[in-house]
Amino acid sequence: MTVFMSFLAAIGRYVLSALAAVGRIALFAMRTVSHLARPPFYWSEFGHALVQIGWLSLPVVGMTALFTGGALALQIYAGGARFNAETVVPSIVAIGLTRELGPVLGGLMVAARVASSIAAEIGTMKVTEQIDALTTLSTNPMKYLTLPRVLAATLALPLLVGVGDALGIMGGFLVGVGRLDFGAATYLHNTIDFLENWDVISGMIKGAVFGFIVALMGCYYGMNSGRGAQGVGSATKTAVVAASVLILASNYLLTELFFSA
Amino acid sequence: MIELTDVRKAFGNNHVLQGVNLTIESGTSMVIIGGSGTGKSVALKCILGLITPDSGTITLDGKDVTTGDRDAFLARFGMLFQGGALFDSLPVWQNVAFRLLRGSLARPIEEAREIAIEKLRRVGLKPDVAEKFPAELSGGMQKRVGLARAIAAEPEIIFFDEPTTGLDPIMSGVINELIREIVVEMGATAMTITHDMTSVRAIADNIAMLHDGVIKWTGPVSEMDNSGDPYLDQFIHGRAEGPIEAVR
């Protein structure tokens, strides 16, 4: 009985601590967003973050999309062949990429690249007292560090998703035409005819949400980093894990919201 | 004048400050001494509002530091951090001129850059250092840049957190001299945290000994050697035997 109660108590403690963490992150997010309405806004930091998060993530997101599009074409062709539906390859590749794989894989790749780098940078700034130094120099760290990064990621991710969609469809096109004997014009017609604006727009909205999550997790765990190299390492790892899980969870909720019958 | 009255701060079960009472007169240089982990940095950060005390009051010129315009309050301070705390991503001159490039003290970029170079020269660094990044500088140079940043906006009050830690004796002497010169020249109020007795004698007008979360002794540096306080005596002579336990 005592062992059972200890087990329940351990679960209770875990749930309570998880709920407290959710509360702290929600408050952090609200504080971040609230600074949008309160000057000053650090444009140079925003521009720098936009380059770091958006422009420099292009290669990794683009390569991911390109190969995923190609692999998807092969899989759909193989699956479709079981019930003579090989012709759906272009449309399913396009819909699958724009609605799901583009934003989710793009988000996860950016989480790995950006959440880790933000958490490590801000965590190091914290343990070397640079955050305290900012405060003593009359500069709010939330305004100077967090808001520009969160805003830049929220704006950059939809654009990255858009580029990823195009490259993913190109990957499918190259495999479809090069390996699966589709005619180039037919493949493009099938892609364009079946693709709707909402497919692309919904994916970009997902991208904006994922961008917000990625930068927020990086900033939150960086700002709350423990001491020393181990503290920064732990903050970096937790930021990437939390961002990845939240991307997958929010993806389900957004898909339910956008596409449930 | 900065006044701390019954300031207490605990981190979990660790009661770091247990009723600190201390007065720092305007235009004087106060050095707080005490062993590692006795709460010297916590006391300093409480004054700046980087840490919120659990109880007690801290006033600056009679006004509670937790009330009023925070930016205006912080604009009166400069601080040299223990490790320099320079911003890695910015060149040296932008570190020094950080406060002059944004906020209420913002100036045109060229003017801010000129002031930064002038302050670098004041701490003995050549103008070519201005374009370097902090990672390219030695520890002593980083301290000097931190010092230049602390005085860039000509603050009324300057805090120095372990200004000579990690430096060789000659560089420590240089930094001590610079601090003393700058404080006298600017007429600033200074508060320094250190356990380097050479720094204490070079920098201080007054000293306060913090131990067990309270100020054990405070008075002019000239009376330090004949204070009759067993804690202070043990500390300034670096004796293992005495009321302060050697293993904390």
Image: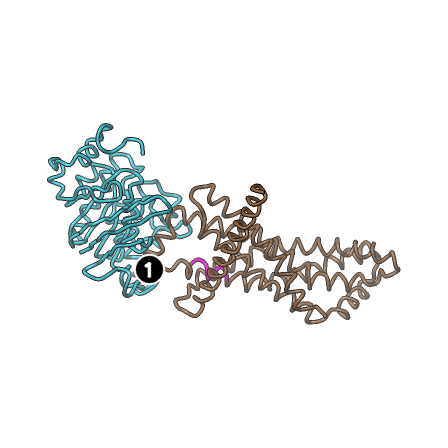
Chain colours: A brown, B cyan
Main secondary structure along the magenta-highlighted residues: helix
Does residue A250 show up?
yes
Within 10 Å of disc 1 (Cα), the crowding (few <14, some 14-19, many 20+) is: many
* Image quadrant containing the N terminus of chain A: top right
Residue at the (56%, 42%) spot, across then down: A2
Whether the magenta-drawn stretch holds residue A146 is answered as: yes
Residue at the (30%, 62%) spot, across then down: B70
Which of the 4 quarters of the picture holds residue B204?
A: top left
Q: Residue furthest right?
A: A84
Residue B185 coordinates in the image, percent (x, y): 16, 51
User: Label 1, on which residue?
Assistant: A138
Residue at the (62%, 58%) spot, across then down: A249
Q: On the rendered structure, is A31 left or right of A113?
A: left
| Helix, strand or loop under label 1 | loop
Residue B192 coordinates in the image, percent (x, y): 23, 46
Q: Which amino acid does label 1 sit on?
A: Ser
Whether the magenta-drawn stretch holds residue B190 is answered as: no
Q: In this view, does A147 lie above or below B24?
A: below
Which stretch appears magenta?
Answer: A145-150
Q: On the rendered structure, is B31 left or right of A46?
A: left
Q: In this view, does B70 lie above or below B93?
A: below
Does residue A52 show up?
no
Between B10 and A50, the one lying in front of the other is B10
Between A239 and B19, the one lying in front of the other is B19
Q: On the rendered structure, is A121 left or right of A179?
A: left
Residue A7 coordinates in the image, percent (x, y): 57, 44
Between B161 and B13, the one lying in front of the other is B13
Which of the 4 quarters of the picture holds residue A138?
A: bottom left
Residue B224 coordinates in the image, percent (x, y): 14, 38
Q: On the rendered structure, is A61 left or right of A229?
A: right
Badge count: 1
Q: Mark 1 lies on which chain?
A: A
